[in-house]
Amino acid sequence: MPEKVLELTPLAPLHFGDGRPFALSEGDETHARSLVLPLPHTLANTVRTQVALASGVDFRSAAALRQLHGVPVYGPLLFQNDKPLFPSPLDALFSPERGAPRLQPLRPWKAGKGRTDLPEGLLPLRPQQAVKAGSAPAFWQREDIRHWLNDGRAPGRPSSGREPPEEVRTRVRIDTERGAAAEGMLYSVAYRSYEILDKKDKAYTFRFYTLRARARIEDGIEPQPLGFLGGERRPVHLRALEGLSNNWWDAPEEIRDLFASADAFLKADKLVRLVLATPALFEDGWRPGWLEKSGSGAKHLPRGLSKVKLRLVAAAVGRRQPVSGWSLRENRPKPVRWAVPAGSVYFFEVEDGDPAAVLESWLRPVSDLEQDRKDGFGLALWGVGSYAD
């Protein structure tokens, strides 16, 4: 089946639960927080539902539901005014005065002079220069990410991609017997607003956000346009965009050139660098489980990774992120799984094979399990890195 890029335009502020328990009983959390973006499987299931409605799928058929669950949907990517934004990479130290100095792995012989509590075989990361780190922007624009993946320094201060702002609404629980507010039962819910009117120097600018996903859909099938996404089933509009390259992001030519010659890549003492554009699920927790099988030709690995043998040398990984939800089939909460957050960075040495093979999974998922990849967990941005001098 061909792939299409689908755009989801929120028609109201959206709420995406962050996995924390929420209830209105004493001692429970009374503020429902919201993630900035939906988790990949949340978006994937919305897309599958809209495709199924347009295709006339019988939701009472177990076989049809299994087939629908296997439709690959890669996302979400956040777009602001039709320009893509990507999570801030965690190997960047954001400094208001000096831009974004890079974190680099120490060379093994330098790392051996000190002691760390890192897992065996992993090297510590060192900044290019001493800086006083500040708060990093949540997202970077595409040109800054492209430059960053090319092992270059971000040009001064990275162009900040502003995240959809939070909107908190206070509510009260209603006593059904009295038809009035229940005493002491105030609670609040956070939403993300995807249409903003900014005012600066007496001038107004309109900022709107959309979500995009890449899905495998049969020719002639258009998803049903009105759907629902996230908590409280808030409305979104779906449409298929014409053309893949114009509406997604293919690997830049300059990145392809860096990987073009395996001999030149190895002689330049370069490292392969992986930046996660969406949260990833690995069987070994923070560490990719496919590492041991990379370059072996084994089946069921992420695209391209069976052709090149990689060895992990360093990583900048954020705090684990809970992944859960509600099982309609079993009518109970799903077991919590822990994801590596978007923006996490991995550094690899190439032990065998062609480094260019990793580009086959450019903005495609690199999670361990096939279903997690079909759900869009672990979209990969590939670039080059180097050891600290």
Image: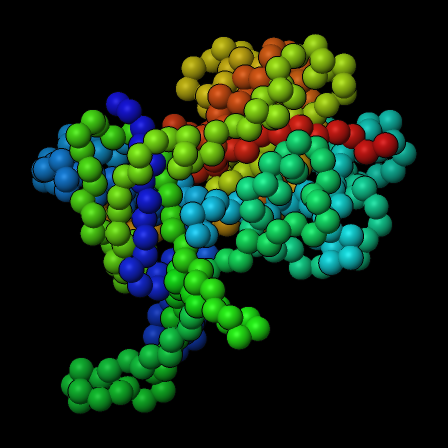
Residue projecting furthest to the right: 113
Which of 192/148 is in front?
148
From where the camera sits, is residue 241 visible? Answer: yes
Question: What residue sits 53% from the left and 58% below the top?
Answer: 162
Question: What residue sits 49% from the left and 21% below the top?
Answer: 360
Question: What residue sits 37% from the left and 31% below the top?
Answer: 244
Residue 5 image point, x, y percent? 34, 36
In the visual, does 345 lie left or right of 127?
A: left
Residue 176 image point, x, y percent? 18, 82
Residue 10 image point, x, y percent? 32, 56
From where the camera sits, is residue 309 visible? Answer: no
Q: Is residue 214 above or below residue 200?
A: above
Residue 70 image point, x, y percent? 28, 30
Q: Is residue 313 above or below residue 16?
A: above
Say which quarter of the image contains residue 123.
top right
Which of 106/164 is in front?
164
In the visual, does 272 lie left or right of 247?
A: right
